[in-house]
Amino acid sequence: MKAFRTLILTLLFFSLTPAALYAKTPDDQLIIGMNMNNLLSLDPAAMTGNEVVGIIANIYDSLVELDPNDLTKVLPAAAESWSVSDDGNVITFNLRKGIKFHSGNPMTAEDFAWSMNRLLHLNMAQATTWKSYGFTADNVQQMIRAKDPQTIEIELPKANDPKLMIYSLATLGSGSILDSKELMKHEKNNDWGNAWLTTNEAGSGPFKLDVWQAKDVLRISRVDDYWRGDAKLKRVIFRHMTESQSLRLMLEKGDIDIASGMSVPDINALKGNPDVEVKEVTKGTLYYVAMSLKNKQFENPKVREAVRYLIDYVGINQTIMPGYGFSHQRPIQKGMDSTLPDPGYTLDVAKAKALLAEAGYPDGFETTLRVLSDQPFINVATSVQSTLAQAGIKAKIISGTGNQVYGAMRDRNFDMLVGRGGGGVDPHPHSSLRSIAYNPDNSDAARLTNFQGWRTSFYDKQLNEMIDAALLEKDAQKQKQMYADVQNRYDALYPAILPISQMIDSVVLRKDVKDYIPHPSSTTHLREVYKQR
């Protein structure tokens, strides 16, 4: 009898088709495995981190978008056309007719004006860039206005490059158009609906939010009669997965369709798999070591210079960063005409020890080093900890989630940090400088939380003025030289943020997933994605 049962089970096994032997996601659903530790809020005004940007881009519409294949090309979205006044002071957008929010409410120019008014009044992370443009809670209603139900006017509060502002509307997520009528139903204690919008949505995009369970799963589903045509997929499910080997195994088995945030060895192992495809996209975001100038040791420029020579740039980029990024030591992303060649800093412990002695720390000191508990951050932090110790700086690593690491940085309550950030989303050098180096108001009350320079308390009045002047220069050659001067001054100031690498984002997908185009700004649109089986 036992032999008979064995024979039957064997016959059943070999009679199974390959589809029955391996898992297979539904044809009309996309399953994405990703680390959601840094996914803290779905409110476009409060969002931080690349992870949430890709979700917001599929729930909300913006006025314009950037072509993923050519970031200098601005594409129409909710605005079908736009124009800039002869003096460059007013940008006019013409809104499409017939767009509806998920609530059924019609979208009007007033919704966009209200959304920007809300952004400046909440004064959360995404307000930072707009404050740098001169917008405030006091002037936003006057400067960003609905001329009529289909016409939006944005008047620049101060001299600026209107092209840069259009880029920001296309990439930051802060330009998302919110359903003002729906949100006001959920307002509590004058919070503009922020508490409700943290875990809900009020958009008009091709997908609507079904459920979000923090650090577990987020599900969005297709919206019927979307103005650009219904999305090809019925549903997209984002699953919280932090282990690279689990992502690899589930992708190989077909349990998930797309994986992001995988380790380099696992990505390389999958490159030989005929059923998967690896897509790499270069981003302007930088991996860096940051120091807080609120700390008495790092307030001393000699100490910051010493730290500059206590990073094993070559070792980190050769052994840790392949697949995650490539060597870069300038605040402006590589590939732009205005970016200077790398200064070529290397590990030099003897020089660092001499600088620390000059600063009054011949035996070093104790500090803390915050870092995400994910790759490649934790490996970079371990390397930095080791080389700091060679000069007597004993750095205790504090690892954790995005809120524990970047939250402390936004609160200006940290010593050192290994992070990833900066501009470079917009195809303009000012975008990089604004995020890494620019800090027009160093007061705690300013809350310029999306500026890495402000977070580190790094402030130089002359540098700010140089950045402002370069932005407004009309002559291309003069502007290029001005940006070179900015980078040289930044370097000479022994800055609080030391760039190590420029980011490469590797996404691995099953080959039956079609028309998935990863976007350099993280605003990857999923409405055209489908499966071919």
Image (tube, rainbow, N blue to C red):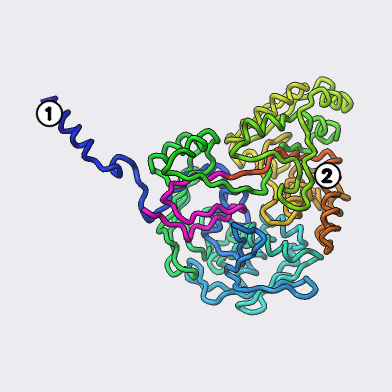
Residue 533's place in the image compared with 348, above or below, is: below
Q: How many marks?
A: 2
- Quadrant housing the N terminus: top left
Tell me, yes or no, if residue 257 can be seen here: yes
Magenta segment, which residues? Answer: 506-533
**Residue 88 position within the rendered picture, expressed as x and y whole percent measured from the top left:** 78, 71
Residue 358's place in the image compared with 208, above or below, is: above
Tell me, yes or no, if residue 454 can be seen here: no
**Residue 488 position within the rendered picture, expressed as x and y whole percent measured from the top left:** 85, 45
Q: Nearer the viewer, residue 177 or 4?
A: 4
Q: Is residue 372 located in the magenta-colored stretch of the structure?
A: no
**Residue visible at 66% across and 64% down in the picture:** 116
Say few, some or many: other residues with alpha carbon within 10 Å of mark 2 (under 14 / 14 to 19 / 20 or more): many
Residue at disc 1, secondary structure: helix
**Residue 58 position within the rendered picture, expressed as x and y whole percent measured from the top left:** 52, 59
As drawn, the residue found furthest toward the left would be 1
**Residue 164 position within the rendered picture, expressed as x and y whole percent measured from the top left:** 72, 61
State the image quarter where residue 347 is shown.
top right
Amino acid identity at mark 1: Phe
**Residue visible at 66% across and 58% down in the picture:** 122
Q: Which residue is mark 1?
A: 4
Amino acid identity at mark 2: Tyr
**In-image side of 163 versus 97 (left or right):** right
Q: Which residue is mark 2?
A: 490
**Residue visible at 67% across and 78% down in the picture:** 147
Residue at disc 2, secondary structure: helix
Q: Is residue 513 located in the magenta-colored stretch of the structure?
A: yes
Residue 397's place in the image compared with 514, above or below, is: above
